[in-house]
């Protein structure tokens, strides 16, 4: 039987400080525990805790429209992390992506 191995990329803001961290602080542990309980081995890369975070700004402003829109470098991080991912040898990849919404004033 093939072993189930999942490489998890999280682009949420959970590891930070403040209310969001308190609300979502255990997300990484819960994801890992849920996968383990299902017989899945996982390795996790939390974008904001990774060496790649310094290379990108999640608050980059676009020229038009004048509203700020988050730029989440999913493809770039996965490509940059390919070597580490291949060493782990996952059968699957999971991407945890933040819920983006527009706040109307």
Image (cartoon, helix red, strand yellow):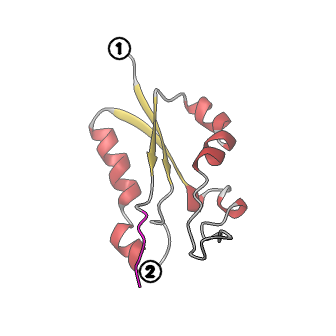
Q: Quadrant of residue 22?
A: bottom left
In this picture, residue 100 sits left or right of residue 62: left
The percent position of residue 11, horizontal first and vertical second, equals 51, 56
In this picture, residue 56 sits left or right of residue 29: right
Q: Which residues are magenta?
A: 100-105
The kind of secondary structure element at disc 1 is: loop
**Mark earlier in primary sequence (1, 2):** 1
Residue extending furthest toward the left: 37
Mark 1 lies on residue: 1
The main secondary structure of the magenta stretch is loop
The percent position of residue 40, horizontal first and vertical second, equals 36, 33
Residue nearest the viewer, comparing 65 with 94: 65
- Mark 2 is surrounded, within 10 Å at the Cα level, by few (under 14), some (14 to 19) or many (20 or more) other residues, namely few
Mark 2 lies on residue: 18
The kind of secondary structure element at disc 2 is: loop
Q: Mark 1 vs mark 2: give the one in front.
A: 2
């Amino acid at each position: 039987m093939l072993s189930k191995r999942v490489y998890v990329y999280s682009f949420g803001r959970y590891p930070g400080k403040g209310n969001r961290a308190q609300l979502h602080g255990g997300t990484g542990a819960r994801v890992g525990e849920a996968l383990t309980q299902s017989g899945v081995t996982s390795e996790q890369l939390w974008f904001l805790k990774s060496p790649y975070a310094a290379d990108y700004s999640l608050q980059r402003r676009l020229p038009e429209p004048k509203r700020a829109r988050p730029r989440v470098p999913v493809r770039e991080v996965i490509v940059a992390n390919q070597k580490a991912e291949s060493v782990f040898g996952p059968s699957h990849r999971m991407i945890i992506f933040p819920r983006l919404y527009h706040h109307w004033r």
